[in-house]
Image: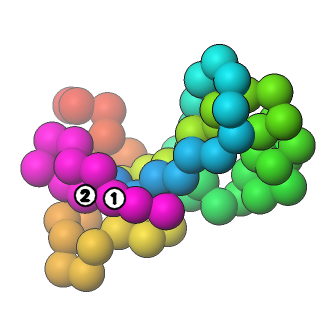
Amino acid sequence: MPFQMANETELYYGARGDGPPLLLIMGASGYGGVFGRFAELLADEFTVVSYDRRGNGQPPAGGPVYDLTGGAGR
């Protein structure tokens, strides 16, 4: 999975399949990898995109630390 810059932070994401886009977003402290087999099945009909939320999964080393209040935009 590649990285994409978003608001000065690199986010790790993955895309698979072919068809209309379908974005899978994990809850508060999740990462895109938890969708695993579910994403594979959906990829038969959709272009499935998932990503690691800030501070979870595969964030770049030395990146900023995020918490729920920071994610809410205070």
Q: Position of residue 6 (x, y in %)?
A: 22, 43
Q: Amino acid at mark 2?
A: Glu
| Identity of the residue drawn at 31% across and 40% down | 71
The quadrant holding residue 60 is: bottom left
- Look at the image and tell me whether residue 30 can be seen: no
Mark 2 sits on what residue?
A: 10
- Between residues 72 and 41, which one lies in front from this camera angle? 41
Report the disc number at residue 16.
Answer: none
Q: Are marks 1 and 2 in contact (CB under 8 Å)?
A: yes
Give the CA separation, mark 1 to mark 2.
6 Å
7 within the magenta span: yes
Q: Residue furthest bottom?
A: 61
Predominant SS along the magenta part: strand
The kind of secondary structure element at disc 2 is strand
Mark 1 sits on what residue?
A: 3
What number of labels is visible? 2
Q: Position of residue 21 (x, y in %)?
A: 60, 23
**Which part of the image, by quadrant, shows the C terminus?**
top left
| Identity of the residue drawn at 43% across and 71% down | 58
- Between residues 7 and 44, which one lies in front from this camera angle? 44
56 relative position to 50: left or right? left
First to last magenta residue range = 1-10
Q: Amino acid at mark 1?
A: Phe
